[in-house]
Amino acid sequence: MTATAAYQVSHLDALEAESIFVMREVVAEMERPVLLFSGGKDSIVMLRLAQKAFAPANIPFPVMHVDTGHNFPEVLEYRDQRVAELGLQLIVASVPEALTKGLVRESADGMRNRIQTPVLLDAVEKHRFDALFGGARRDEEKARAKERMFSFRDEFGQWDPKNQRPELWALYNGRHHPGESIRVFPLSNWTELDVWHYIARERIPLPSIYYAHQREVIERDGMLYAVNEFFRGRAGEQPFKAQVRYRTVGDASCTAAVRSDADTVEKVIEEVAATRITERGATRGDDRVSEAAMEDRKREGYF
Amino acid sequence: MSVETVAPAEADASARQMDLLRFATAGSVDDGKSTLIGRLLYDTKSLFTDQLAAVEAVSAARGDEYTNLALLTDGLRAEREQGITIDVAYRYFATPRRKFIIADTPGHIQYTRNMVTGASTADLALILVDARKGLVEQSRRHAFLCSLLRVPHLVLCVNKMDLVDWSQEVFEQIADEFTAFAAKLDVPDLTVVPISALQGDNIVSRSENMPWYEGPSLLHHLERVHIASDRNLVDVRFPVQYVIRPQSTTVTDYRGYAGQVASGVLKAGDEVMVLPSGFTSRIAAVETADGPVDEAFPPMSVTVRLADEIDISRGDMICRPNNAPAVAQDIEAMICWMDETRPLQVGGRYAIKHTTRSARAIVRGLHYRLDVNSLHRDETAGELKLNEIGRVRLRTTVPLLADEYRRNRTTGGFVIIDEATNRTVGAGMIVEAG
Ligand SMILES: Nc1nc2c(ncn2[C@@H]2O[C@H](COP(=O)(O)OP(=O)(O)O)[C@@H](O)[C@H]2O)c(=O)[nH]1
Ligand SMILES: [Mg+2]
């Protein structure tokens, strides 16, 4: 905490204090919380906040990764290392396993964004989780701008945007019946830039793909996709080398990179402060499907 | 200094020293609320080109004559289809001085619930009126709700000044009328700004069209309005949220009380009292994960350790022996009812969440229902329906550790929950606890 004589706190300290408060509320009031940990920057920041909220005790809940099978190796490595360092229990809800078992079927376009929802809900039911911490932020997307900190989900994991609980002061209502659950978004009020300022201030290590590096890519619909085992070019698409970094880390088959020379956290902050395109707009093929793509997925139980 | 262009939040260390201002916006339909928010986002470079392009595309497809900036905030399918704002939307922008969180709340009376929600956490509320129409019923209601929720700063934006020839006379008449009304409501700080949201006058920089106006531009005011002293730094109130007791071989005998400071300043060595037990002790340390701190004050989340081992659990409150909240089961409160299915009724039983404490309560009496437009008190009312506000008397199963809402927004506010549906059905502001 950096406080001045006038009893003021910076916006980052205020955001941190709010997130810590939210995490403590959940642990105090809910029975089986879990933190969704993808190895992406937002979930990494959330994990740091969880460490702070309960220190000197350990983080009192497990983390879960919904694994689409389309991963960046750097991110998986980071995930395992972090979990080991903190002595956390890691639960992997695996889409490839669910495909093998016939729980879900591959969609026509090969994108696994939609089919990860039933896999997530299945894991929630199996482990009887009643609170799920997610790293979603309200500045990311217009449906998310309407989310609550504590977002109620019915027994099918569904979000009903027109029927949300009013959220007053810092009084969060996590009451629910068995089978229902609460999605909790401690980073609701953070922006992409806040997250990066915090990463810089706290010196939080990130998977290397967040910083500029050389990569073989293909340009499609104005976005740069890395060529890898999950993403191959179509006829007529020429792979080429480019200096890129990732602004978001999601399924490797639908997350695009951006051209960038920002190879340090300071340079990334400069870049993010100057950019004129939202992070999902620049990098997510899955949000481009329709005007309400995110709202529709959220209704079904997506984060 | 006049602010001509506003740079986006900088990357350097000074950006990390920005503070945070939360404000709520209110206005009637078509007063220009969405245009104003769009303008603030645009002029602070917080609007992204893909967001703008998406809005332009949707606007064009619908045959709108102009790019409808309302589509930026109306994010839900139903909102876009019906062309209305249903729910509170949160928007973010920053200047090198401050980060801003906007709670954009729809204005119509059927959305009083949303405005109350947005105002509950706001440092400042921005009320819009159309210069051609002057004050309308809704403007008075918005001002009343802001005063009920004790929003410390109020800004009245008289919008569409371009449509009244930038007339000083029109502006002053509206400003005077509103100021007189606000005085009755006991609004602590009021600023009135003549603007054109559409053309950008007095938004970022002072307008050349209104040389007679000598006050600051809207953004200049938002960036500089002094909010640090709005916090109550006098009454020490630390609601215990969670007890940290590591089950570890390396850290033994640790017992810390985690929570967020509601008000006052806590430091090591302070004499404290714990409620409801009334036991006293001394603060041994105020800690964070980054080490001990000299002092803790709102809104810091910290862990307090005491010199003596006393039995403390979630829902207890750490305060000072000579400055403590009421320990009370009989609560007088203003209630805003938020449930469309069932009204609040005398004799009704509900769950209550107040600070970190939960209780059950029975409604013992309804003194009156307030007409939020005329402020008339209807003492014959038998219930409160959705969006209605009234004064009630409650009896709780366990004592609340409570202050008057007007003195402390954190220890004076509570929510009412329906135990059958688990829905949040009301917001309460304590008038008297005894
Ligand atoms: N001439 C003029 N028109 C404005 C101004 N502000 C908003 N409008 C127009 O008023 C109409 C309603 O504005 P909108 O922002 O949608 O109002 P809202 O319902 O309060 O969100 C739109 O046609 C705007 O272009 C202004 O300052 N001057
Ligand atoms: Mg609007």
Image (tube, rainbow, N blue to C red):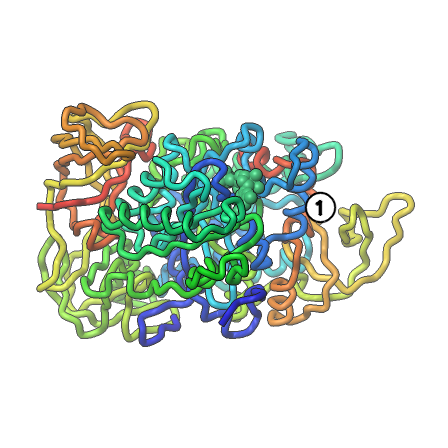
Rendered location of residue B111, percent (x, y) = 39, 34
Q: Say which chain tag 1 marks.
A: A
Q: Residues within 10 Å of mark 1 (few under 14, many from 20)?
A: many
Q: How many marks?
A: 1
Give how far across and how far down residue A127 sits, in percent.
46, 39
Q: Which residue is mark 1?
A: A254
Q: Residue furthest right?
A: A236
Q: As shown in the figure, which amino acid type bears the numbered disc 1?
A: Cys
> Where, quadrant-wise, is the N terminus of chain A in this rendering?
bottom left
Place of residue B218 in the rendered image (x, y in percent of width and height, measured from the top left):
46, 58
What residue sits 37% from the left and 32% below the top? B109
Query: Which quadrant of the figure has residue B116?
Result: top left
Going 14% across and 40% down the picture, which residue do you hit? B332
- Identify whether A7 is placed above or below A298: below
Along the line of sight, the residue nearer the viewer: B371 or B296: B371
Residue displayed at 39% across by 73% down: A2
Q: Compared to A261, does B193 lie above or below? A: above
**How far across and down, in percent of the image, does residue B180 sit?**
27, 48
The residue lying at 24 percent from left, 47 percent from top is B185
Identify which residue, B397 or B132, lies in the foreground: B132
- Ligand 2 contact, mark 1 (Cβ < 8 Å): no
Query: Is residue B61 among what the camera can see?
Result: yes
- Judged left or right of residue A54, residue B54 is right
From the viewer's side, name the closer residue of B137 and A158.
B137
Can residue B314 be seen by looking at this rendering? Answer: no
Question: Dividing the picture into quarters, in which one does residue B350 lie?
Answer: top left
